[in-house]
Amino acid sequence: MIADFTSGGSDLRWYVVNDDVMGGRSEGDFEQADGKLRFTGNTDTNGGGFSSIRTRPVQLDLSKHDGIRLHVKGDGRRYTWRLTTAARWRSREVSYWAEFETRNGTWTTVDIPFASFIPRFRGNRLDGPALDPGQITGMGLMIYDRRDGPFELHLASVRAYEGDAPFTLREYRWKNRVLVVSAPSVDHKKMRALQDELASTPAEFADRDMVSLTLLDDTVSEIDGRVLTTGEVATARTEFGIRPGVFALRLIGKDGSVKLSGESDISMADIYALIDSMPMRQREKSRR
């Protein structure tokens, strides 16, 4: 995790840089509230045509990672993630740009490989030097899609990621039972109730070799601490017949089959009782 914008998150001291530095007329600003950063404004291509926010100098060694992972809710416009390092071109600071698309009003997880960052100076593309992830000195979010009009992007987190193989439940087969919980929001009433039950029964959960897979519309989805991409979330929902925007629960057995499926309140006590009635669970208990 590099930034998550919560009260306990890292303060990267963001500041605004708009195209008025070169005579443009675009406007942009940001605010941090409710664990999100909100970047808004209006671009005017009769001038520079860009708005950006940037961090104060940082020192990040991301050489063991493969890229930057953003969790964003956009407006359908194209944005740019910006990095700086110690690299120079004719004694001037080089910046590295990588563009990404957004979906209007939809939270998505965007992976930007370091290999896709292009060196630039004042917006002009350079032949080099290549990005060195071990010497990152600054980051930024920019809109420069050569369009006029208002923009709004919500940023929930910035992470560095490693090139994991695509997520699949097959890696848990014969090792774990997977509790799949999907909801439109982490604050959904049924989701909160289930999370409270899980928090109060950690020993019972672990004793049954269980892991949880959360599929959320409004924030990061994950399984056993691993963050899932938007595509992985969509694939998992399709596999289990779960529509976005609804609460749903699936219990996947160690053999990979669905043991329980529902979209109503199901208590963890009932789930534990169901697992305990399974022949495999009874054999596990006798061995233990």
Image (cartoon, rainbow, N blue to C red):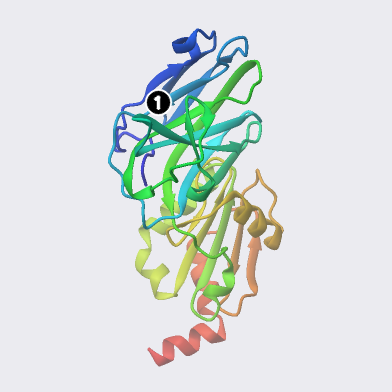
Label 1 crowd (10 A; few <14 / some 14-19 / many >=20): some
- Residue 257 visible (yes or no): yes
Left or right: where 203 falls relative to 68: left
The residue nearer to you, when weighing 82 against 157, is 82
The residue nearer to you, when weighing 107 against 19, is 19
Percent across and percent down for residue 225 are 42, 58
Up-down relation of residue 35 to residue 192 (above or below): above
Q: Quadrant of residue 251?
A: bottom right
| Most distant residue in the front direction | 90
- Residue 35 visible (yes or no): no
Q: How many marks can you see?
A: 1
Up-down relation of residue 200 to residue 220 (above or below): below
Q: Give the residue number, with chain letter if any, for mark 1.
A: 32
- The residue at 57%/34% (across/down) is 73
Determine whether the residue tagged by mark 1 lies in a helix, strand or loop.
Answer: strand
- The residue at 55%/25% (across/down) is 143
- The residue at 54%/46% (across/down) is 116
Left or right: where 64 falls relative to 267: left
Q: Quadrant of residue 129?
A: top left
Q: Split into 4 quadrants, where in the image is the C terminus?
A: bottom left
Left or right: where 99 falls relative to 175: right
The residue nearer to you, when weighing 29 against 283, is 29
| Most distant residue in the bottom direction | 287
Up-down relation of residue 70 to residue 161 (above or below): above
Percent across and percent down for residue 52 are 47, 23
Percent across and percent down for residue 112 are 52, 46
Percent across and percent down for residue 121 are 46, 29
Q: Quadrant of residue 94?
A: top left
- The residue at 45%/46% (across/down) is 130
**Amino acid type, label 1:** Gln
